[in-house]
Image: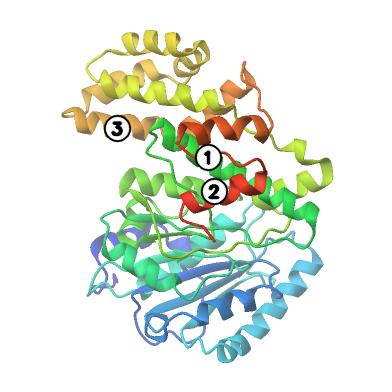
Amino acid sequence: MPDTRLPAQITAYLKRHAGASTRAITGSVPRRYAGAIVIPSLAEAANLPHTLESLSRNPADLLDQFLILIVVNQRADATAAEYTDNQATLKLLSLWQKQYRLEHLAWVDAASTGSELPLRQGVGLARKIGLDLALPLLDYTTGDPLLICLDADTIVQPDYLPAITRHFSGTSAGGASIPYRHRPATDPAAQSAIDRYELFLRVYVLGLELAGSPYAFHTVGSAMACRASAYVASGGMNRRLAGEDFYFLQQIHKTSGVASLTGTVVFPSPRSSHRVPFGTGRAVGDMLNEGEGRLLFYQPELFAIVGEWLACVADNLEADAAGLLESAARIAPVLHGFLEQAGFRGAWANLKKNSRGAAQLRGAFHGWFDAFRTMRLIHEMSDRGYPRIAPELAVAPLLERAGLATPDTVSGQLELLRGMQGAGG
């Protein structure tokens, strides 16, 4: 029987996605909450207590309104060390709950024998399990509850929950990208690697911003949040092994919008890891093993090409596909070839047919030329005529286009962009 206390769209979503929400929650859930913080945890017995302690320093009245839900997880092919660590976490959670006075802490066992995640699954499914389980535990009577994604190796500030709740009270966007900066590494080589990688991420967002892309926001799994209504409207969290944050916020933006939050910063771990095929841990590990030349940056000209293309479409919404493709060829032949291969000719005709007015057509175009297709174009151009280059050559031109001074070092450029993007000192 459907829960009549839940909005119809929440009930419908849970009916469609019942598989992820059938797992049991351990811990007391005495009432409904204004929001939930979902934390996947894989072999994090050494790190998770620090995350919980940092959460405990948030205002008591806000902590009382949020469920903190840990999803202890592993696949059936996990190592013995991961299994042992997860079992230790499951035994210690009740102790940490008391130690950090987190009354509304609960957890899900997706790690013990018979409860593991399927093979080839990972953090995306772990997040989805927690987020889906949280939905029926939220209070929909006083507003639109919040779902917050955090990681078990990430530290937050005492203003974390105040900033998030304040943000959503003042925006119509359904999703939020939260400012982040990686914590200091334990040695100079690791510090240099994480600085270079974070600079790469920030320069990419800066390039998209200068290009006028609506997807110029960070997609970091430990630093994102959304309204419950936006979550279900987007189809919920995907099950990807890596990149789940990128695709999730892309879909949230398409359906409800994403706004960059201000007023707090989260601090992910700088450690290397090979748990996933790409991402922070993999990039840092590859640089430590193979040298920093392993991570090169996109040429600044690529963002100028993207910007010209976006402006071309925005200024010529009445044009047919052939005319826009001719313009694309003048901007860059590789852009033209990419659009032809991606099926722009048919897509544009369909978008025009189904859009009423310029605003709807513009939005539909950005739904087609989304964050993923933008990234694919940049990769394609990098492979065909615009090879990646060292940050010493890539960063300064973009900073100059943004009207910013250009520090000489990677660390200096990183601090400049952190400040510009809401994660300054």
> Label 3 near label 2: C-beta < 8 Å?
no
Residue 139 left/right relative to 297: left
Residue 114 left/right relative to 97: right
Q: Is residue 198 visible?
A: no
**Element marked by disc 1:** loop
Along the line of sight, the residue nearer the viewer: 417 or 262 = 417
Q: Rounded to the nearest whole Å, what is the CA distance between mark 1 and mark 3?
A: 36 Å
Q: Residues within 10 Å of mark 2 (few under 14, many from 20)?
A: many
Identity of the residue drawn at 34% across and 80% down = 32
58 to 171, vertically: above or below:
below
The kind of residue on which mark 1 rests is Ala
Along the line of sight, the residue nearer the viewer: 11 or 127 = 127
Q: Which residue is mark 2?
A: 416
Query: Which label was assigned to residue 405?
Result: 1
Q: Earlier in the sequence, mark 2 or mark 1?
A: 1
Query: Which label was assigned to residue 364?
Result: 3
Q: Residues within 10 Å of mark 1 (few under 14, many from 20)?
A: few
> Label 1 near label 2: C-beta < 8 Å?
yes
The kind of residue on which mark 3 rests is Ala
Query: Which label was assigned to residue 315?
Result: none
Identity of the residue drawn at 50% across and 10% down = 333
Q: Nearer the viewer, mark 1 or mark 3?
A: 1
Q: Nearer the viewer, mark 2 or mark 3?
A: 2
